Structure formats: structure tokens, C-alpha cells
Amino acid sequence: MPNLHSRLPFHYGWIIVCLGILILFACLGLARFAYGMLLPAMREGLGLAYDQMGYISTANFAGYLIAVALAPLAIRRFKPRLTITCGLLLIACCMLAISQSSSFLVVLLLYTLTGIGSGFANIPVMVLVSHWFRRERRGRAAGLMVIGNGVAIVFSGFFIPFLNQQFGEQGWRIGWLSLGLIAICISVIAALLLRNEPKEMGMEPVGRKVALDVETMSVQEPSNGGQIILWLGLLYLIFGATYMVYGTFIVTTMVVEFNFAESTAGMFWSWVGFFGLFSGVLFGTLSDKIGRKAGLIVVFTVQTLAYLLAGSGVGTTALMASVALYGIAAFAIPTIMAAAVADYMGLNKAAAAFSIVTLFFAVGQTVGPGVAGLIAEASGSFTTSYLCAAALTGTAILFAIFLPNPRSKD
């Protein structure tokens, strides 16, 4: 695409952000967050037991965990553009295949592969933020990208119930088929328009350039870099465990414990997506201004309140407030984490460091829902699970308070 940037009235970095929105819409929004809406009809259509439903979800997270471990190698060998495109194509093919499946084991395998595709698309696109945006714009750019997750939640909250009403027992199959076709379209767009770094187009990253760009210097990496990665990883692990407990079971809680109709639960889930539209931008921009450390403290505080309200048992009003708080903070931690890793470790280490901390996140989201399900099975309610999630995010606030600040500013 030679000389395209010279004809654009804005920096090509903002095209990268728009592509990031589409990629996250597909690789996480459709491939993961739509599952909860498809699950009730899928359970009836395939005769799934509750534990099998959980195994399918866990398989997806396990696939994501595999991709996290392999992503640094893939990014170095194939670069982000090709890695992302292949990840999206894998997601699309698996979704199309799930729409035709009639076996639990086949769906289990395909959704594992979907998780692998999600990891290969998500990690490189978040790494691109570090290359296309300098520090004072990085949080905002990452925040804009994760709008894609919120849009997908809103979309699935209305689209899947509509398909179920129109096609009855075949609605979930049409749903997977439709999502797969959308993912194919997005993979083609990504392949055509993504660029790995500004140098490919003869450009500089978005943001203020200083005389000595410390982000590209080896001295940027702190002497306690391993400790910083561990610290950030633990925070990301807590986020992964707790936000997926809520994301996996809140619709079931609405239907089973609050006796909501599926369409009503879908509307509530869409509100999560609506508030999530502002999540990344709000907290990403805030972290640009007050710092990543303070931003993490604020987000974990909001999440703690959301989980406390969900586990309070007070009633529908508390649940509505919980949904709003969960939505507004849902995608803030990935936004801040993508920016924080580059701030602490520098651009040369950003891809590998982000993959490591995402490994912690993947472990958390793999283990969290399973443990919460066991707690709910033993107690007969998800109330205790939400309260445990609140205790974990409360602990994360303390961890974040003692997180050191980056050594240098650009």
C-alpha cells in the first residue's frame, strides 16, 4: 500500500486501532463472549450435561493458554500481521464446523482450537499498540481497540436470541455459522490492511517524540524486570479468574436464581457490552494521565464493588448496578496491561513480556470458572463464588498499591 498514508488526513496508526476493534470483535467478542448466549440452546440441541458445558468452556481457555505460550515464537517468525490473520481464519473455520457438529467430543476439540486462534489474534494485535503509539497515547489506543469486545457482547445479546426465535432448535447452529462467516470477512480485512510497524510505511509512531527516545533503549528495561513481570502477571491472573467467573455464570444466575427469561437475560448481557464500549477508552485514557499503577487500583476497586453487589443477594436493583459496574470495568485491565508492559519493559521486550503476563491471565480464566462452579455446586448458589471473586480483587488492590512506577518517562 505505497504512499497511502500521504493521502490520509490522519495517521495510519488510527487505521490500526480500527482494525484492532474488528479483530477483538471477532477473536474474543464473538469467539468467547457469544458462547454464553449460545449455550442454553446448544445444551438442549446436543443434550449436554452441566459439567460438559463447563468442560467446553475450559477447553477454550486451555487452547488460549497454548496460544499464549506459542505466541512470542509466532510473532517473531511470522510477524503480527500473518499471525493475526491465521488466528482469525482458524477461529472462523472452527465456528463453521461447530455449526455442523453433533458430538460433545467434536465440539470440545473445535472449541479448543478456537481458543488457540483467539490467542494468536489477540496477543499480536495488543502488541501492535506499543509499536504504533508512544507512551502518552498508548493507553487511549489500547482502550479504543477493546471497544470491539463490548460491541460483540451487545451484538450477541440481541442477535442470538433473535436467531433462536426465528429458527427454533436450529438457531444455535445458524448462530455459529453466522459468527464464522463474520470472522472470515474480518480476517480478509486484516490481511489486506494490517501493517506490523510504522517503518513499513515510512512513518513514526503516534505521539510526542523526544530527543532521546528511551523506549527504544536497552536501559529502559528495569533491573527488577523479572519481579515486575511477576507482579503484573499476578494482577492479570486475578483479573482473568474473577472476570470470567462473572462472565460465565451471570446469565445462568439471572435465569436460574432470578427467574429471568432468556431474552431478558440477553438484554442484561447486552448492557454489559454497552458499558464495556466505554471501558477501555475511559480507563486507558485515565491511566495515561494518572499512571498505570493508579489506573489498576481504580479498576480493581470498581470490579470489587461489582462482585460484592452480585453476591449480596439484595435483589434485581443490586444486580443491575453490578452489571453496570462490571461492564464499565470489564476491558480496562487488558487495556492498561498492554500499555504498562511496554512502559516497564520497553518496546524490544514488550511482545515477550506481554505474552508472559497473558499466560498468568490465561491460567486465571481457565481455573476461575471451574472453581466457581464447584463452589456453586456445593453451596447451591453462585453467591459465594461472587463474594470470593470480590475477595480476590480486593487483594489485587493491595498488590497494585505496592507496584513500583516505571523508571523513566518519555
Image (cartoon, grey):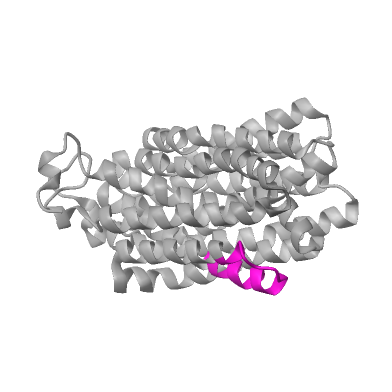
Between 304 and 317, which is closer to the camera in this rendering? 317
Q: Is residue 261 above or below residue 367?
A: above
Task: Residue 221: name its quadrant.
Answer: bottom left
* Horizontal relation, residue 316 to residue 158: left or right: right
Which residue lies at the image location 43% right of the left edge and 42% below the top edge?
292
Q: What is the span of residues highlighted in magenta in the rendered image?
A: 97-115
Which residue lies at the image location 48% right of the left edge and 61% below the top edge?
92
Q: Is residue 269 above or below residue 242?
A: above
Q: How far across and how far down the image is residue 163, in percent?
A: 64, 44
* Horizontal relation, residue 113 to residue 35: left or right: left
Query: Looking at the figure, which quarter contains the C terminus?
Result: top left
* Horizontal relation, residue 178 to residue 317: left or right: left
Q: Please, which residue is most extreme toward the front here?
A: 167
Whether residue 20 appears in this view of the structure is yes
Q: Residue 101 in magenta?
A: yes
Q: Is residue 16 above or below residue 226?
A: above
Q: Residue 30 in magenta?
A: no
Query: Looking at the figure, which quarter contains the N terminus?
Result: bottom left
Q: Is residue 252 above or below residue 272?
A: below
* Horizontal relation, residue 400 to residue 188: left or right: right
Q: How far across and how far down the image is residue 332, in percent?
A: 50, 41
Which residue lies at the image location 70% right of the left edge and 68% below the top edge?
102
Q: How far across and how far down the image is residue 16, in percent?
A: 30, 47
Q: How far across and how far down the image is residue 298, in percent?
A: 54, 35
Name the main secondary structure of what is drawn in magenta. helix
Which residue lies at the image location 79% right of the left edge and 64% below the top edge?
51
Between 136 and 192, which is closer to the camera in this rendering? 192
